[in-house]
Amino acid sequence: MKIESQHLEDHQVKLVVEVEPEPFEKARRQAASRLSRRTKIPGFRPGKAPYHIVERHIGEEAILDESLEILLKDLYPKIIDEADIQPHGPGKLENIVSVKPLQLEFIVPLAAEVELSDYRSMRLPYELEAVTEEDVEKVLQDLRQRQAIEEPADRPAEAGDHVFIRLSAERAIVEEGEEASLIAENPHSLVIASEDEEDEDEWPYPGFSRELIGMSGGDEKTLTHHFPEDSDFESLRGATAQFKIVMEEVKARTLPDLDDEFAQSLGEYENLEGLRTDIRESLERQAQESYDEDYQDKILTEILEQSSLKYPPQMLEEEVEEVIHQLQHRLQAQNLDLDTYLRTREMSEEDLRKEVEPVAETRLKRSMVLVEISKEEEIEIPPDEVEAQAQQTLNALFSRMSEKDLKNISNEQLIPNLVGNIMADMKIGRTLARLKAIAKGEIQEAEEENSHEAVAENVPPAAETEQVEETAGEAASMQEEVPSAESPQAPDEETQSALEPEGSEEQ
């Protein structure tokens, strides 16, 4: 068997393989026999027709296709082995170059390759902002707003009132080709902000609600506002709009007192201080999670920018499929399906694949880097921790499922898949935690501290030091006097690893 290899730019390899005549001819005979058993040939019992009869009755192409299936079952692994490549997955028979001699052309995706940057020297400042009393107070005031009691007000609108309006807007100046209408008339409700409240995200523009102060039910008003070119509302950028407002109803709002009774109405809180503590802890937890997520993004972005990644197109296609699969699960939870989703967005499945490809590519690259770093850092998860997490997940899963759904589940498939996913998630989580500690400089500090402690523990007292020096001197003089055999070399890393007792690897 002769093999010619050509590495392609997309991290695949083209193999042109010339197969020896004997195994190919044997496969052709087996193929003809197999086909004759499946096809009725006049005058012959199934499987007994001679080769040339089968060829004439069925055709040479059908025999060739069947013979390749037989041949490649055993031959393909040998091709991969002799070509000395690490495939990502099954290759594809791209072309039959010739039949005599049999030459086959395969395209084989190669296993991904990751050359990491010097990520251990990376440092990023970790500057998590503390939760302030103002942050806690803002949440408390929001809770008061939600618990407000509303009553119709037979008076002009004031700050703090809940008002119901009809709103529309048109361009003040209509250029050729532009539509006059910017906002079709529609009902809208809002709470009028107080003078010291500023909301940059207020719709349709900051300060709009305070323009309604003094309006009573049935009043109409026209306002003009120019939107900047960088407005968050794309359809309004650069437009000068005339807003028409019709006040329909004004409701006064009475906020509850900020006291222990208010806290107790929101949950199992003994007093207002208990509610404040719970809010602070919740805000701190949210702030920590959000900051850590951004911090990890920065770490991975920096590592990716300085690392080299190679992968075949099949890996990206698989990741795109996974992203779409997860989308389908989310849609099912909302009682929707993918076809309905695509129709509402007026797009094809191919359009969706193109849309999610950048997301899938980022996910793939980050996953590749994290897997490689987990190997470098020797991240391992103890089996008992995986088992405990799997049991917890199964209990939560089964508690939400009906008896009918439980009967349809195959534990032989579910449990191994679940354990595999949990182990992968736990390993990624710990790898991210290790990267965070590296970027903060904590790993280096710990290693240096351990190194100093080890050195200190191994320094002998003064008397012992003298004895060691004397012994070393005697050994040196003996070595000069007595010829010795060549000193054995230290074992290489692979041999050293094999000599280490099981369980010695640091978790």
Image: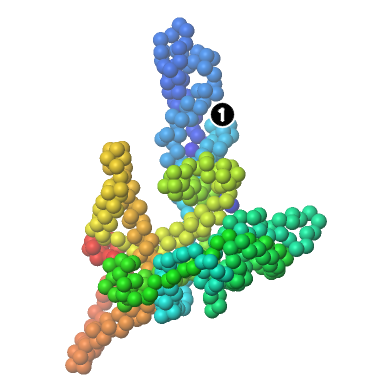
Nearest to the observer: residue 484 or residue 412: 412
**Which amino acid does the dot numbered 1 rest on?**
Lys
Residue 223, horizontal then vertical, whole percent: 68, 67
Dividing the picture into quadrants, the one containing residue 16 is top right
Identify which residue is drawn at 41% across, 64% down.
373
Q: Which residue is mark 1?
A: 100
The residue at the far top in this view is 43
Is residue 49 shown above or below 12? above
Q: Position of residue 328 (x, y in %)?
A: 46, 45
Q: Secondary structure at mark 1?
A: loop
Q: Quadrant of residue 342?
A: top right
Q: Residue furthest front?
A: 154
Q: Position of residue 245 (x, y in %)?
A: 64, 62
Structural crowding at the residue carrying mark 1, measured as other residues with C-alpha within 10 Å and reported as few (<14), some (14–19) or many (≥20): few
Residue 327 image position (x, y, % from top left): 47, 49
Nearer-the-camera pick, 275 or 233:
275
Q: Is residue 353 in view from this perspective?
A: yes
Q: Is residue 64 above or below residue 333?
A: above
Residue drawn at x 27%, y 83% is 453
Q: Residue at x 51, y 26 (%)?
A: 64
